[in-house]
Amino acid sequence: MKDINLAYSVALDLKDDGKIFQAVEIIIPAEAEQTSTTNEIHTSEGMTTRDASSEMRKKDRGNLSFIKNSIQLIGSPLAKQGLNSVLNVIFRDPNNPTANLRLVVTEGEATKILSQKMVGGMKVGEFISQKIKSLERMSLFYPTETVDTVFRSLKDPGQDFALPYIGQEGTEVVAKGVALFHEHHLTGSLNADQSVMLVLLKGRQGENARFTRKIEISYPDNLHGTMTFNLAKKKIKRKFNVHVSKDGDIIVNLNLKLQAIVEEFTEDQALTEKKLDSINQRLSEMLTEEAKDVIRELQKANCDIFGVGRKVIAYHNNVWKTKNWSKDYPKVQFHTKVDVEIVDTGVIF
């Protein structure tokens, strides 16, 4: 093992000349029991991902192994070109990890983020890994996407996927939302709030799914305040139905019933049952519009993340055979409604 360099995180970018630029974080074992491990960042470039790795092996000491690689960052320009060429070597080589390897898209250059080496007092790869897990608990990304799950989506003509989308602000690594894919190309993105809504629309949730919204309700309730509420503490009720009309149009009914827990409300008055009815109605209207905005962005990006095509393949196969899904998915008619009911207002009010 002392002669092997273990890569724990990798970043890939597309250069102007079409070559792949690669940065690899290598963990250096502690020299003594009471000392901690350190990390080194090594870079190389090549015609392909494997070629870049081979060039790195020529320059660095010892053999380079990716068996411990848990994070792979991909710069957005490279992701727009497509993931097939990037992931080809991983799919072909059984020595490369797939089950636990997380794919993350970065705004701009991925290698620039990895080259920071440290974020605060943490190694950059460890920081990003923990950050992704934390954001999953906040329902920004859920369920976990790995190389295995992405591969299944890539081979399914009726299902697309989304990946965590991060960026750099100064020395800070921040969550931008999710990166949307059609087939294997990056085609769009959602911001952080939209990402949480997307998770809920999929019928999933992490430990928390918080929203903060201004509540403006006039006479007779006269409520004007800012409310933070959590939608992940209770079970989501979701209805997702795909229909085909006589004319061959595809219609999707997507309805959510969410139970909210109020965690903060700046209006200094008791939330009576009558006022809760008004707030429920207002929140339902607001989140319904936000859900419709998310679906518009998904269709704009041609990202069938709900697997509408998969339903058409399974239950309306004759119709599917007449469709060009890349052109027909944006024409799908979505009817979306979100109902919110506040079930807990806290221990004071």
Image (cartoon, helix red, strand yellow):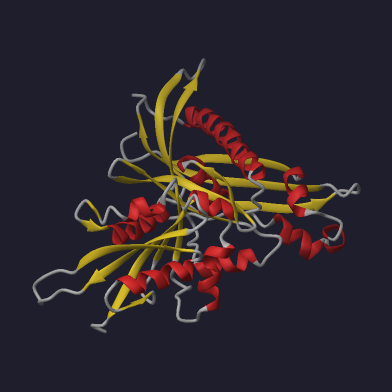
**Horizontal arrangement in the rendering, residue 39 relative to residue 202 (left or right):** left
Would residue 202 be seen by someone viewing this image from the given angle? no
- In this view, 317 is above or below 198: below
Using the image as rendered, state which of residue 2 and residue 281 is in the foreground.
2
Q: Residue at x 58, y 53 (%)?
A: 81
x, y percentage for residue 273?
A: 48, 32
Above-or-below relation of 304 to 290: below
- Where is residue 171? Give x, y as percent: 27, 44
Residue 87 left/right relative to 336:
left
Residue in the picture at 46% in, 42% down: 192
In the image, 13 versus 113, the foreground residue is 13
Give 11 or 174, whichever is nearer the viewer. Answer: 11
Left or right relative to 9: residue 303: right
Above or below for 134 versus 333? below
Residue 160 falls left or right of residue 328: left
- Across and down, in percent, residue 95 comes to 45, 81
Q: Position of residue 277 (x, y in %)?
A: 53, 31
The quarter in which the C terminus is drawn is top left
Eyeballing the image, is 119 above or below 299? below
Rendering quarter of residue 288? top right
Numbered label tally: 0
Question: Which residue is at 31% across, 74% downward?
Answer: 6
Question: Can residue 230 be spotted in the picture?
Answer: yes
Q: For the N terminus, which image quadrant?
A: bottom left
